[in-house]
Amino acid sequence: MDVNKVLDAKGLACPMPIVKTKKEMTTLEPGQVMEIQATDKGSTADLKAWAQSTGNQYLGTVEDGDTLKHYLRKASAEEEKEESKHPHVMNLGDLQNKIEGNEKITILDVREPAEYAFGHIPGAITIPLGELEKRFEELNKDDELHIICRTGSRSDLAAQQLTEKGFKDVKNVVPGMKEWTGDVNQKH
Amino acid sequence: MKVAIIAANGGMFDAYKVFNIATAAAATDAEVGIFFTFEGLNLIHKEGHKNLPMPAGTEHFQEGFKKANVPPVEELVSMATEMGVKMIACQMTMDVMSLEKEQFVEGIDVGGAVTFLTFAKDADVTLTF
């Protein structure tokens, strides 16, 4: 999985995986994702709790033989702000209704690959916000685009960016995956 | 979060109880203070903390510690210091045992009961080991 940093904490006993995670996290930029490889079976519960107390985002864990691969995303204060600039928004209920309708709809998920992997709306296209500038041509300018992220903040930036590039019908889905209760697919 | 710990026992198991919680709390952005009193002073004694006794009859766990790759107490102590855990050695016990500040690991403070109480009075978690 595409991440910004990999921390090898294999073979270490509690509390070392947490202590190392704390140290490494300071080298990450807000919004970046770290993979923590551990063999300590308690590390799943611990990292989840750690993320919760420190305000970071726990994405999920993948078992790979004896190794547990945990995915954490560094907190970003910016994202928690409710401010949005793109004028066209759609709430989660309306999106759900549209998905259930007969029309084929296009959903663009602009979160990081690891966030997408641990749960996304079935059929959503994945292009992380940071790659949109060079990958926007993969999308069709005439489609009605529903852009989603975790809180509605990154998708707001993406919606503005795409509108500037000449996309005609762009909607920012708010508040985002954080409160999505519909179907999700996992892929990892 | 603020965590206040009293370390009153001086065995190897006690050291792990104290320093595992302390370093885990510090890694979770907590402010941590430990008051070392009576046998607890062993845990920060320059030579003593490198060779702490295991409870009688548990020597066979030695192998388990190695197998689980548990870091030596020494490493946990220096990690705690590095992470800003406040360590206070009890003045009264030091007087009773004729110990000087120089005999303890770097970075500790010496204080009395009120020093610890002042730190602990608004703690969210208080533990005694």
Image (cartoon, rainbow, N blue to C red):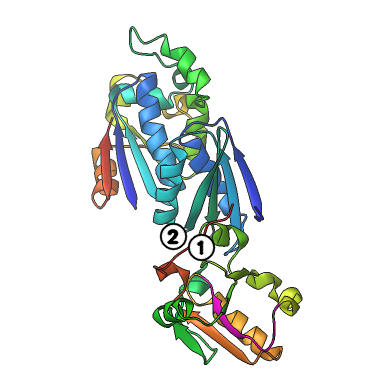
Q: Nearer the viewer, residue B18 or A171?
A: A171
Residue B78 visible at all: yes
What residue is shown with label 2?
A55
What residue lies at 47% left-to-right and 38% top-to-bottom?
B80
What residue is shown with label 1?
A75
Q: Is residue A94 left or right of residue B66?
A: left
Q: Secondary structure at mark 2?
A: loop
The magenta span reads: A139-149
Residue A68 image point, x, y percent: 54, 39
- Residue that protrudes farthest toward the top in the picture: B57
Residue B34 image point, x, y percent: 35, 38
Up-down relation of residue B19 to residue B95 (above or below): below
What residue lies at 51% left-to-right and 36% top-to-bottom?
A16
Q: Name the amino acid, label 1.
A: Ala
Check if residue A147 falls in the magenta segment: yes
Q: Name the amino acid, label 2.
A: Gly
Check if residue A39 falls in the magenta segment: no
Circles 2 and 1 in contact, beta carbons < 8 Å: yes
What residue lies at 57% left-to-right and 45% top-to-bottom?
A36
Q: Secondary structure at mark 1?
A: loop
Real-space Cα separation, disc 2 to disc 1, in angstroms:
6 Å
Residue A113 image point, x, y percent: 62, 61
